[in-house]
Image: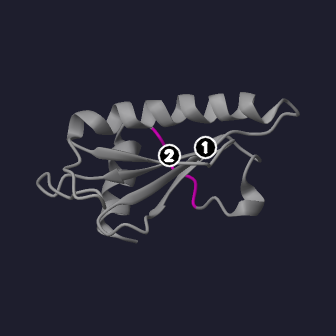
Amino acid sequence: MSDAVTWVTQRLAAAGFTALPSLRPGKYFETTGFAVEPSIVPGAARVTVTARFTGQDKYEQWGEAQTLANKLMDVLEPLGVGFEEVEDREPNCAFDAYPPASAGPVRPDGEPTT
């Protein structure tokens, strides 16, 4: 587990959010929750949020996933975490979280993650 994954997982757990051990593709939509895994970007953690499928339209599930993702970001943002949304993940929601290094990783485009 990377330092970023550990850091993000611990901060979310301290706020009462428990990460799922993994969100393998076969597990999507079986539960509402999130997983924290290494990002392809060094120094970042990938947070993937999914909502349990209940037979409704996939966009309703996406809204549920977005709501949970926003709650997770609300916990991390005051701690100095930067975010980069991962596009085209509907009906899942995913973002890369950049923990403060003492605050400093940058996104791949070179911009600070503030």
**Dot 2: few (<14), some (14–19), or many (≥20) neighbours within 10 Å?**
some
Position of residue 85 in the picture relative to residue 100 (left or right): right
Q: Which residue is mark 2?
A: 18
**Extent of the magenta region:** 17-21
Q: Earlier in the sequence, mark 1 or mark 2?
A: 2
Residue 19 drawn at (x, y percent)? 51, 50
Q: Hey, which residue is sitting farthest right in the picture?
A: 55
Contact? badges 1 and 2 (CB < 8 Å): yes
Q: Is residue 53 left or right of residue 91?
A: right
Observer-nearest residue: 112 or 79? 112
Assign a secondary structure to mark 1: strand
In the rendered structure, the answer to whether residue 14 lies left or right of residue 71 reads left
Residue position marked by numbered label 1 in the rendering:
33
Q: Residue at x 61, y 36 (%)?
A: 65
Image location (x, y in percent) of residue 32: 66, 40
On whether residue 94 falls in the magenta region, the answer is no
Residue sitting at 34 percent across and 60 percent down?
A: 44
Please name the amino acid that badge 2 sits on. Answer: Thr
5 up-or-down from 75: above or below: below
